[in-house]
Amino acid sequence: MSLKKVVLPKELIDIPGSDSSFAVRGISMMDISVLLNQHKSLLESLYQRFTADGATVGTQDASAILRDIAATAPALVASIVCLAAGGGDDEEELLIAASLPLPVQIEALEKILKLTFQREGGVGKFLETVTRAVAGLNLQVAKL
């Protein structure tokens, strides 16, 4: 089958009190690259926090990690929602994603994560992969 015929699964997010809704998909490696480029220092600090005392991301409660990220990194959450909704790097779409009510952002993030991790071994495995990528970037920068 050709990739042209592939239909990516999406989930619909309704905006309460409005006739508006938007669809999100799981995030891709390209999206992760964008997130690393846009939020490198934030992701590095999250990596440091979640790997303190020798713990690995895979052994921690993924739900707690995601709640912490939502509470401490709203710009990252807005970027994830924007990318998953097809907004790419459009500044207007990013501002809309950032201004969505918190419950809508959380619902969108939950659905994005569900779509992203259906086949990837869960949230913990994904976060472990991303943090390894951030650690790898740190090693490359240190060599320069």
Image: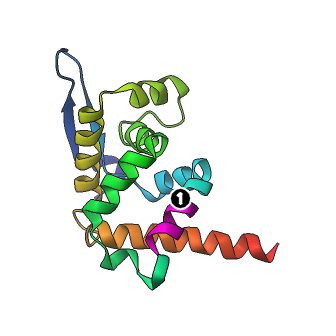
Q: Residue 140 appears at what percent x and percent y?
A: 71, 73
Q: Is residue 110 above or below residue 86?
A: below
The quarter holding residue 121 reads bottom left
Let me know if residue 129 appears in the view: yes
Q: Residue at x 36, y 68 (%)?
A: 126
Q: How is the image coloured?
A: rainbow
Residue at image position (41%, 81%) is 55
Residue furthest toward the right? 144
Residue 144 horizontal/vertical position (percent): 82, 72
Helix, strand or loop for the magenta stretch, by majority: helix
* Magenta region, residue range: 43-51
Q: Residue at x 66, y 71 (%)?
A: 138
Q: Secondary structure at mark 1?
A: helix
Asked whether residue 46 is drawn in magenta, I would say yes
* 143 over 73 or under it: above or below: below
**The N terminus lies in which quarter of the figure?**
bottom left
Dot 1 crowding, Cα within 10 Å, few <14, some 14–19, many 20+: many
The residue tagged 1 is 43
Most foreground residue, 120 or 40: 40
